[in-house]
Amino acid sequence: MRATSLPTLLVCLLLAGCDGAMSVGKVSDAEETAIKRTATAAPNIQPGDKVRVTVFGEDRLTGEYEVDQAGFMSLPLAGTVKVSGLTKPQLEKELTKKFRGEYLRDPKVTVDVSNFRPFYIMGEIAKPGEYQFKNGLNVMSAVALAGGSTYRANTSKVLIQHVGDKSFKEYPMSPEIPVTPGDLIKLQERYF
């Protein structure tokens, strides 16, 4: 009886350490290549981003605006504009069309994202929490930004849930794996 209960106890301890509610899948080579390609391009504007709009010669229209959770931004004279998913050049073109009218004949609009959505890091990390996204961020620099991993961390792989994904994907811990705005990053505990 004692031989049976020891393996059962070990299995129970292993399962207790796993997060049963968290769905994890291995990332395919194609998915890894796609996320690397996405990270080299400028991120699309998403809810939670802060956008700096400059309308040359119109100081009262120039300002910083936040994209609401539905993906809209409200601006004077332009009204409410759907901006989620647009690139900076696409938003500049859309705002130029909106501002053009009886008030402005030929508006010159530039757009810059002043703050992207933060990313979150949790698990076996020294300082888990919310961190400001910066262009060029990768998983190793994100871990360093959060104070490094604990001595219990599995430092060979990392779990990432990108915005819009329903589950975490397992990636190798590598400087080639980028972090994108809004990512959830988790370092798991190593077991042996």
Image (tube, rainbow, N blue to C red):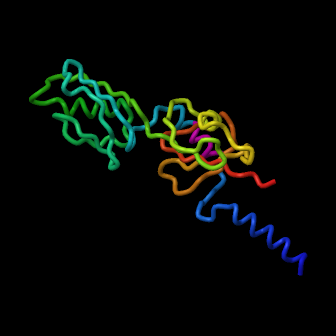
| Residue 42 visible in this rendered orientation of the protein | yes
Where is 177 relative to 55, above or below? below
Where is 89 relative to 165, above or below? above
Q: Nearer the viewer, residue 29 or 4?
A: 4
Q: Nearer the viewer, residue 133 or 162?
A: 133
| Residue 159 visible in this rendered orientation of the protein | no
Taking the spot 19% from the left edge, 39% from the top edge, the residue there is 79
Taking the spot 53% from the left edge, 47% from the top edge, the residue there is 162
Q: Nearer the viewer, residue 13 or 25?
A: 13
- Coordinates of residue 164 in the picture (x, y in percent): 47, 51
* 167 drawn magenta: no
Taking the spot 68% from the left edge, 37% from the top edge, the residue there is 174
Where is 67 relative to 134, above or below? below
Q: Which residues are magenta?
A: 29-36
Of all residues, the one furthest to the front in this rendering is 127
Of all residues, the one furthest to the left in this rendering is 102
- Coordinates of residue 124 in the picture (x, y in percent): 66, 48
Q: Is residue 83 left or right of residue 166?
A: left
- Coordinates of residue 168 in the picture (x, y in percent): 59, 53
Q: Is residue 153 left or right of residue 22?
A: right
Q: Is residue 171 left or right of residue 129?
A: right
Q: Nearer the viewer, residue 107 or 148?
A: 148
